Image: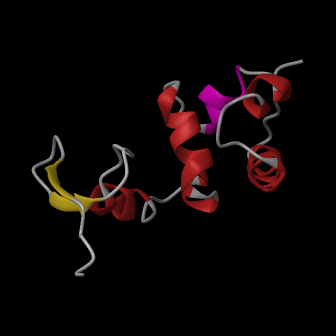
Amino acid sequence: MVASKGTLRACKNGHKYYKSSDCPVCPVCEKDLGKDKGFLSLIAAPARRALQSIGISTLEELSKYTEDEVLQLHGMGPTALAKIKEALKKEGLAFKK
């Protein structure tokens, strides 16, 4: 029996890829996101997607949220939160109180 590669899909950017799960993330787009400069490149993909899902792409936008609000996002964990706090601190920013 030959293992299936999954279903051929195409993302909104036109990349074609195979996926065997229901996950909608394009691996080509995801790989490109990791090359970003800035704080999003410091954290793992699930945490990055969690922030992007609510429209956060800068530390200034992130500082409008409380630490508890960010920690409640699916995909956000203590490791990513520690990296985010350090990035905020370096820019003289902090989570909303």
- Residue lying at the far front of the rendered structure: 1
The percent coordinates of residue 46 (x first, y second) are: 58, 49
The percent coordinates of residue 17 (x first, y second) are: 19, 61
The prevailing secondary structure element of the residues shown in magenta is helix
The residue that appears at 24% across and 70% down in the rendered structure is 4
Q: Give left or right: position of 19 versus 83.
A: left
The percent coordinates of residue 30 (x first, y second) are: 38, 57
Quick one: 60 or 4, which is closer to the camera?
4
Quick one: 71 or 2, which is closer to the camera?
2
Quadrant in which residue 62 is drawn: top right
> Taking 27 as reference, is 11 above or below it?
above
Quadrant in which residue 60 is drawn: top right
> Taking 10 as reference, is 44 above or below it?
below
Q: Which residue range is magenta in the image?
A: 59-64
Residue 38 belongs to magenta span: no
> Is the C terminus in the top left, top right, bottom left or bottom right quadrant?
top right
> Is the N terminus in the top left, top right, bottom left or bottom right quadrant?
bottom left
The residue that appears at 73% across and 21% down in the rendered structure is 65
- Residue lying at the far bottom of the rendered structure: 1
The residue that appears at 57% across and 37% down in the rendered structure is 50
> Taking 2 as reference, is 77 above or below it?
above
The percent coordinates of residue 57 (x first, y second) are: 51, 37
Number of marks: 0
Q: Give left or right: position of 81 versus 10.
A: right
The residue that appears at 54% across and 31% down in the rendered structure is 56
Quick one: 63 or 14, which is closer to the camera?
14
> Taking 96 as reference, is 70 above or below it?
below
